[in-house]
Amino acid sequence: ALVTTGQVALGVIPGDGIGPEVTAEALKVLEAAAPADLKFAPTQYDLGAERYLRTGEVLPDSVLEEIRGQDALLLGAVGGKPNDPNLPPGILERGLLLKLRFALDHYVNLRPSRIYPGSVSPLSDEVLAKGEVDFVVVREGTEGPYTGNGGALRVGTPAEVATEVSVNTAYGVERVVRDAFERARRRPRKKLTLVHKTNVLVHAGQVWWRLFQEVGAEYPDVTTDYCHIDAVMIFLATDPQRFDVIVTDNLFGDIVTDLAAAISGGIGLAASGNVNPDRTAPSMFEPVHGSAPDIAGQLIADPTAAILSGALLLDHLGHPEAAARIEAAVLADLEARDPAQRRRTPEVGDAIAARVAG
Amino acid sequence: ALVTTGQVALGVIPGDGIGPEVTAEALKVLEAAAPADLKFAPTQYDLGAERYLRTGEVLPDSVLEEIRGQDALLLGAVGGKPNDPNLPPGILERGLLLKLRFALDHYVNLRPSRIYPGSVSPLSDEVLAKGEVDFVVVREGTEGPYTGNGGALRVGTPAEVATEVSVNTAYGVERVVRDAFERARRRPRKKLTLVHKTNVLVHAGQVWWRLFQEVGAEYPDVTTDYCHIDAVMIFLATDPQRFDVIVTDNLFGDIVTDLAAAISGGIGLAASGNVNPDRTAPSMFEPVHGSAPDIAGQLIADPTAAILSGALLLDHLGHPEAAARIEAAVLADLEARDPAQRRRTPEVGDAIAARVAG
Ligand SMILES: CC(C)[C@H](C(=O)O)[C@@H](O)C(=O)O
Ligand SMILES: CC(C)[C@H](C(=O)O)[C@@H](O)C(=O)O
């Protein structure tokens, strides 16, 4: 829902590891940034690896229904210790993260990439000198190779055949492409790049290509461009400045956004939104990073990505100015950071909250 | 075939644009590097965009059958001018490149990545200072999402549904995984990383994971590791030194190898082999770069990637020492390069051939 004044019913899923630590700071900054007449009413949901290990439950239906009633969701990170034999791989991913995206129709997975001041990009000075890096990936979130379609025959034998089916509908592609055109139109450069592999994945490629052209005809002010997923790898490494908005399918988007986060100085600053633009269910905002069990409990995690996810949340609720205040505060904080001085998680949150309020 | 002495029946597909220019240099260096009792008998095949535009033919069956009779194949690059309306996208990719890989059972697509001296990596000095980058990707070449399986319903309507089916067989996965273990065993670090997305693509993930474990049990001297495709993006950008040999599916391999080529100083040095390890058909060696129509005809293209592809060809035919001589000559040439002095394509070939012979 758009929530202009009054109470925001905010579902908070702190999750595991550093999840609760960074979520607390995101909430602190959200409250500092919100207009005076907007109040957050948080409800915490205990979900993730810990709950699964304790109870065997991943996402009970009753909890999903409660979550559905919220205005927006803030997620920390879920995931247990690597290679925990009691936590089969995929359980939380499919049972919780993807389940929420599909159940709440999060068809736009939004991932902005910027190289912030002071952030350590792995790219060379020569590449960075070409100009500012500032683009956003609009990743489809509800179909493609993520549907679980497919199966296996003669499992465990030398005659095994396993398939994965990427499902692409005009319905699903049209709406995400339209959302991406809308976002491109609102940005100064107004440029949208479709990323796919149309020369090999012809069936899916054809419906993406067609709708990109058809919807694009309604946005003559937006410049369009097409790039194969493999070529995107080269461009992101050597010329990331060329991108403004990228629209792509679920799996290509997963891959592109991790590279985008890496080149823009790491997953520690990457925010994301799982957005339902039609507002038929709450959208969910989360840092791209994981639960980092190795550093959990020490309050040394950087909450910046969670805080920036809060900015996306405010923007989605209809408060772009408040969102911009958070971004500006983060920017100022990053500029003022002294690499020699390591602050604790709440200190970073306090500093950014103070800048937002000031 | 292994060809130890005598004549090598070499099928040469120069292709389009700079293809013929770089192939000529690769052949020059091949001849210089081959042992005295090994002679190349090249047969040229006129295939690619130009032939298609002239005749409407992509790969006539009779040509494919001739090609099948060769000992090995050297390909330049194929592809016409971008957006040529007479050259529908995918025609050459599927009708020629992929058709050859499938018809000749090139189930190992081999792509080594090294940061050579003097090559301009887009990575920062900090990342490069971590150590030498030297890994090879073994990409499956005959199944996965590249089979063309799938289709579309109600095409062109708002109710369109299009699917792409990734096909993974125990037969196909086992043989490429085994090849990768063999290659890892022959390298000093003896480390093999499986790259997939097992937490989402569970059906395919399961057969890859199982065979990686099963075959791995026969190679206790090889250290194994697993990485999701999205995490690989981060590692390639920030810590490429961690990789030795990577084995992965056809589409992930396409994506990973372009990023690998980019970070190791560009597509201009990236060589590749489409290998049939069982030698039931000729293997094909080619630079990763395209036909670069914009610089064709000027003899300014860098033939190094084509020359390095020739080294892979010699290695495959059973001449690892000759292959190593080419690599050493390329290395020496790269070290001696003066960025201020631009050499023409044949000058680079001559210089490397002279070093190989000397
Ligand atoms: C955890 C996993 C299922 C998820 C995905 O693949 O979408 C993650 O990588 C992401 O990008 O949010
Ligand atoms: C041209 C295309 C079909 C091909 C592929 O996707 O395999 C290319 O990108 C490659 O990597 O050799």
Image (cartoon, coloured by chain):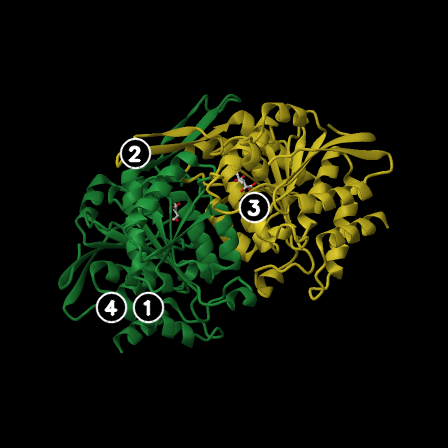
Chain colours: A green, B yellow
Task: Please determine if labels 2 and 3 lie on a single subunit.
Answer: yes
What is the number of the mark on residue B349? none
Chain holding disc 4: A
Q: Is mark 3 within 8 Å of ligand 2?
A: yes
Asked if labels 3 and 2 touch by Cβ distance under 8 angstroms, the answer is no
Tag of residue B257: 3
Q: Residue furthest front?
A: B54
**Residue under circle 4?**
A322
In-image side of B357 versus B243 (left or right):
right
Instruction: Check disc 4 and give the amino acid type.
Output: Ala
Chain letter of mark 3 equals B
Residue under mark 2: which chain is it in? B
Identify the residue at image location x=75%, y=38%. B314
x and y percentages locating residue A117 in the rendered image = 44, 71
Q: Nearer the viewer, mark 2 or mark 3?
A: 2
Find disc 2 in the rendering and name its residue. Answer: B160
User: Which secondary structure, mark 1?
Assistant: helix
N-term mark: 4 or 1: 4
Type of amino acid at the residue the image marks with label 2: Glu
Instruction: State yes or no: Cβ of the residue under disc 4 lies below 8 Å from any atom of ligand 1.
Output: no
Cα–Cα span, label 2 and label 1: 40 Å
Q: CA distance from mark 2 to mark 3?
A: 33 Å
Q: Looking at the picture, do discs 1 and 3 lie on one chain? A: no
* Mark in front: 2 vs 1: 2
Query: On residue A327, which mark appears?
Result: 1
The amino acid type, in three-letter code, at marker 1 is Glu
Q: Residues within 10 Å of mark 2 (few under 14, many from 20)?
A: some
Q: Is residue A97 visible?
A: no
Residue A320 higher or lower than B347, as above or below: below
Residue at the limit of the structure toward the left, as seen here: A6
